[in-house]
Amino acid sequence: MNDDQVYCIPAKFRRIENLHILLWLLKDICWALNLRVAGLIMIVPTLTVAILITWQTRRITAELLHNLAVVLWITANCLWMIGEFYGWDEGKFGTRRLALIPFGTGLMILAYYYIFLAPSKRFRQKMQREMEVAVKQVQEAPRS
């Protein structure tokens, strides 16, 4: 892909991504306000929609890898939040430190993408083709 090409994502995907932002913000507001029950409840839709987005983009490698990193980020974020809610976040094996596992895994996925895949012209061309196929599939899918 060159800088003049238009990056296109199906509107259906974009709407779900926008919903995900809302859910994530609500979860984090609950965390900031120490609303334990609401925060714990918000984990389910926030993580579920993140996984759905990852599933929807599974045929577009670049999107898949970024969305996997987001799922891991939210997982780490939730682990840390739960630890703060219940006082489990401190110490050598506190949830804040345990959250480094999904944070680090997501970071390794993105490092792999940006160091090895993204610089490759062949990979970028493949991504363009994958995106075109995905858009076409969504456009041709029966409306529900």
Image (cartoon, rainbow, N blue to C red):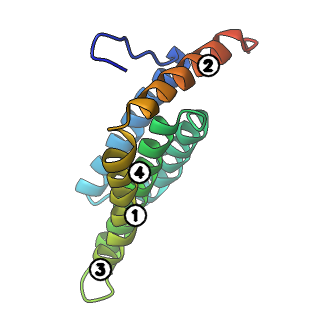
Q: Residue at x 44, y 36 (%)?
A: 20
* Disc 4: CA contacts within 10 A as few (<14), some (14-19) or many (>=20): many
Cα–Cα gap, marks 1 and 3: 25 Å
Residue where numbered disc 4 is placed: 69
Looking at the image, do the residues carrying marks 4 and 2 touch, with CB atoms under 8 Å apart? Answer: no
Q: Which mark identifies residue 105? A: 1
- Residue 130 sits in quarter: top right
Q: Nearer the viewer, mark 2 or mark 1?
A: 2
Q: CA distance from mark 2 to mark 3?
A: 48 Å
Q: CA distance from mark 4 to mark 2?
A: 23 Å
The answer to whether the residue labelled 1 contacts the one labelled 3, judged by CB atoms less than 8 Å apart, is no
Q: Earlier in the sequence, mark 4 or mark 2?
A: 4
Other residues around mark 1 within 10 Å, as few (<14) / some (14–19) / many (≥20): some
Read off the residue under disc 2: 133
Count residues near mark 3 (Cα–Cα under 10 Å), then give few for <14, some for 14-19, many for 20+: few
Looking at the picture, how far across and down is residue 86, in whole percent?
34, 76
* Image quadrant occupied by the C terminus: top right
Towards the viewer: 74 or 36: 74
The first of marks 1 and 4 along the sequence is 4
Q: Nearer the viewer, mark 2 or mark 3?
A: 2
The residue identified by callout 3 is 87
Q: Earlier in the sequence, mark 2 or mark 3?
A: 3
Instruction: Specify which label sits upstream in the sequence, 1 or 3.
Output: 3
The residue depicted at 35 percent of the width and 38 percent of the height is 118
Looking at the picture, which amino acid does disc 3 mark? Answer: Gly
Q: Which of marks 1 and 2 precedes in the sequence?
A: 1
